[in-house]
Structures are given as structure tokens and as C-alpha cells.
Amino acid sequence: MIKAALSKMYAEYRRFLGGMEFEHTFGFYADQSIGDCSHFSGREVIVVNERRAYELDYRGGLIHP
């Protein structure tokens, strides 16, 4: 489901940051994030049969060598 959601996000919006919601046969995927490529954080969740099946908090940003 994550692969399908991220593929759709990139195909439609040409980005991964910024958040989205995605209905799938197996459940519901939601991603919320703040920031830009220099510094960002967010959370993605998958809900199946009204139960949270997966949750991930993430953080990242551009690394300057």
C-alpha cells in the first residue's frame, strides 16, 4: 500500500513532501509533513478496518558536506 500511495503522490504532484491521503483496497494511507527539503518532519499512517496498522514518524533534511 505504501508503494502505491507514494507512486500516486509522485505521479500526480511530482513530490513526496507536503502530505496526502490515499484510499486503497486494503485500507487508508495518510501522510502529513511540514518543512521543505532543507529540513522536514512528518508522520505516515495506515489504517485497516478502522484500526491503525502502521505508523511512522520521520525527520530529515539536506546534508551539506
Image (spheres, rainbow, N blue to C red):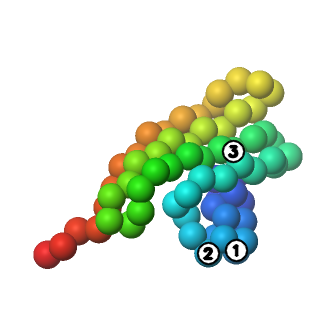
54 shown above or below 41? above
Q: Residue furthest left?
A: 65
Rounded to the nearest whole Å, what is the CA distance between mark 1 and mark 2?
A: 6 Å
From this viewpoint, is residue 7 visible?
A: no
Residue furthest top in the image: 51
Residue 21 place in picture, x, y as percent: 71, 48
Label 3 crowd (10 A; few <14 / some 14-19 / many >=20): many
Secondary structure category for the residue under label 2: loop
Q: Identify the residue position indicated by label 2 in the image.
A: 14
| Rendering coords of residue 63 (x, y %) | 23, 68
Q: Amino acid at mark 2?
A: Arg
Quarter holding residue 51: top right
The label shown at residue 29 is 3
Spot occupied by residue 18 in the image (x, y as percentages of width and height): 55, 57
| Placement of 48 over or under 65, stated as above or below | above
Residue that label 1 marks: 11
Relative vertical location of residue 59 with respect to residue 10 in this rendering, above or below: above
Q: Taking 45 as reference, is 16 above or below it? A: below
